[in-house]
Amino acid sequence: MSRDEIGVYAAGALREFAERVLVQAGMRTDIAATVAEVLVEGDLLGHTTHGLALLAPYAAELQQGRMTNDGEPEVLSDKEAAVLWDGRRLPGPWLVCRAIDELLPRARRFGSATLVIRRSHHIACLASYLLRAVEQDMLIVLASSDPAGRSVAPFGGTQAVFTPNPIAAGIPAASPLLIDISASITTNGMSARLAQQGRQFDEAWLIDAQGNPTRDPSVLFAQPPGTILPVGGISAGHKGYGLALLIEALTGGLGGYGRADGAEGWGATVYLTLHDTTGFGGKEDFHRQMDWLAQQCRENLPRPGVDAVRLPGDRGLALRAQQLSQGVSLDPTIVPALHKLSETWSVPMPSAIQAHTVRGA
């Protein structure tokens, strides 16, 4: 397939490709399998900036020794329902999956259980983990911050202090609710993608170094740099600012490691809690409440220009089902990077199920 084309690929073939690249780059085989699964899950759900777009950066971090390729997390504290790990800069997707597996029996026993990971490497797309818990009748809350990154200013300020600070929740229901949001109005990944393409956001989601609202993501890379606005933007950004502070408390605060410490490079401090739906009012009543709310939302009269009211996760789950059966349509910015990885690590690029041209010859 020409690099002027993008393709649709079988999810299994993409997982195998990603795993083989990571193993060639030095990652332990079982860790690589988990990381590959999480990255492809991001693309399946439509989070294209946090799926296989991260494969090349992850391989580079491994090659340059900034991501630990083997070993186990260190248990710093274990109070049964409250656990703290030092992630030792191991791959974040593997650490988070391990953490969910660790918490499942504890949440069954205590009703809720929490695990915080400090010194994890980057954890990819938060939505990618939610079904792993929801399918076990668990309500999951997951949040992360990156002590080494700064791209979001506090509300009213012009100098970056925070990362976008994502938070996600998976809520069991007849059709699961998958919430994946952040304290900032957009992400670093989308800002970088648009800046590279010379494009702008539809609305003024950033400010330049002087505090002027702008649609241009290139201000993040200027000197001095601009910043991404918190959720709520210029007029109501105190909401995102408060959410950012809460996520910092859940991650760096509870973990005892964060922005007050020396930065080690691209990574994450992670907060994860599982709530057992059978451990409080009971699974049946939990579903009764959430399914009633879901029905009220979906049957809500839409405003002009909106076809129907959706719930968080509706679009992602429908896209996931479609792409599992018909193939994953990769963003055109991703395919050239995968070809380069194929050449660098001598791993054959998966064959496309179908392809189409994105620019003329």
Image: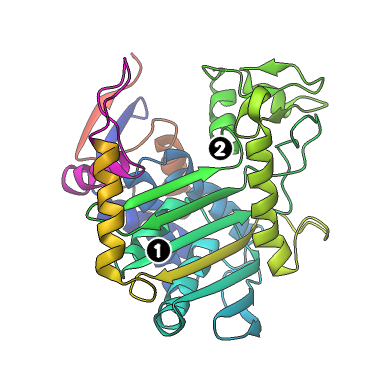
Residues 169 and 45: in front is 169
Residue 66 in sight here: no
**Direction left: furthest residue:** 325
Give residue 139's mark: 1
**Where's the C terminus, which quadrant?**
top left
Q: Marks 2 and 1: which is nearer the front?
A: 1
Mark 1 Cα within 10 Å, few/some/many (few <14, many 20+)? Answer: many
Residue 135 is situated, as x and y percent measured from the top left of the image, at 29, 65
> Which image quarter: residue 154?
top right
Give the SS element for disc 2: helix
Q: Quadrant of the N terminus?
A: top left
Tags 2 and 1 touching, CB below 8 Å: no
What label does residue 189 carry, if any?
Answer: 2
* Residue 47 vertical position relative to residue 235 in the rendered view, above or below: below
As drawn, 329 above or below 130? above
Q: In which quarter of the image is residue 186?
A: top right
The image quadrant that residue 222 belongs to is top right
Please tell me which of labels 2 and 1 falls first in the chain.
1
Give the secondary structure at mark 1: strand
Query: Residue 154's mark?
Result: none
**Residue type (three-letter) at the residue carrying disc 2:** Gly
In the rendered structure, does residue 308 fall within the stretch colored magenta?
yes
Residue ID at (44%, 77%): 111
Task: Answer yes or no: is residue 47 visible.
Answer: yes
**Looking at the image, is 166 positioned above or below residue 307?**
below
Question: How many circles with numbers are drawn on the protein?
Answer: 2
Depth check: give the residue in front, 134 or 359.
134
Q: Which residue is drawn at 36% across and 24% down?
A: 4
**What segment carries the magenta color?**
299-328
Q: Distance between the residues labelled 2 and 1?
A: 27 Å
Q: Which amino acid does label 1 sit on?
A: Leu
